[in-house]
């Protein structure tokens, strides 16, 4: 009985493998109608999250340094999590071009701000 079960599993795995080989071979012969530009393939979008607590003097420099990257600006998003700030961190980050998430209350640290 165990030998029959092993043969059945082996046969099933053979057909699964054969399926993937066939898909791989046929993918070389099909035409792909892709209407995206070459830049869309080269550059993916990404987001930078900056947790901040009372960092008004340095937050503008942090946000602008991300935007200075040699990368298409429409593919970059910067989020600043203002964690219980008592200064103008949120306002300064927003003026620098970041999207600001204000977390009111007691500052609980960087990891808690990232969970927000």
Image (tube, grey):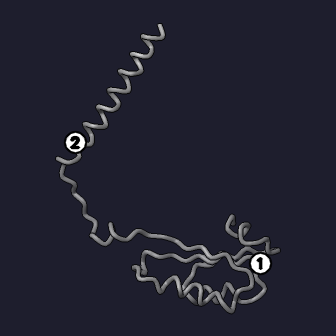
Give the crowd class for mark 1: few <14, some 14-19, many >=20 residues within 10 Å: some
Q: In the structure shown, which secondary structural element does the residue marked by tag 1 occupy?
A: loop
The numbered disc on residue 25 is 2
Instruction: State the image quarter where residue 93 is shown.
Output: bottom right
The numbered disc on residue 84 is 1
Q: In the structure shown, which secondary structural element does the residue marked by tag 2 occupy?
A: helix
Q: Residue at x 73, y 80 (%)?
A: 53
Q: Residue at x 60, y 73 (%)?
A: 49
The numbered disc on residue 49 is none
Q: CA distance from mark 1 to mark 2?
A: 57 Å
Instruction: State the image quarter where residue 82 is shown.
Output: bottom right
- Looking at the image, residue 61 sits to the left or right of residue 42; the answer is right
Residue 78: x, y in percent? 55, 77
Asked if residue 18 is positioned above or below residue 105 in the image, the reply reads above
**Residues at circles 1 and 2 in contact by the CB criterion of under 8 Å:** no
Instruction: State the image quarter where residue 57 is shown.
Output: bottom right
């Amino acid at each position: 009985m165990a030998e029959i079960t092993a043969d059945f599993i082996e046969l099933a795995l053979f057909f699964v493998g054969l399926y993937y080989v066939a898909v791989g071979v046929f993918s070389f012969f099909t035409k792909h109608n892709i209407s995206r530009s070459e830049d869309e393939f080269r550059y993916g979008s990404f987001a930078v999250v900056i947790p901040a607590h009372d960092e008004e003097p340095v937050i503008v420099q942090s946000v602008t340094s991300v935007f200075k990257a040699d990368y298409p600006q429409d593919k970059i998003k910067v989020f600043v999590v203002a964690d219980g700030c008592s200064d103008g961190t949120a306002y300064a980050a927003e003026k620098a071009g970041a999207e600001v998430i204000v977390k009111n209350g007691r500052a609980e640290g960087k990891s808690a701000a990232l969970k927000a």
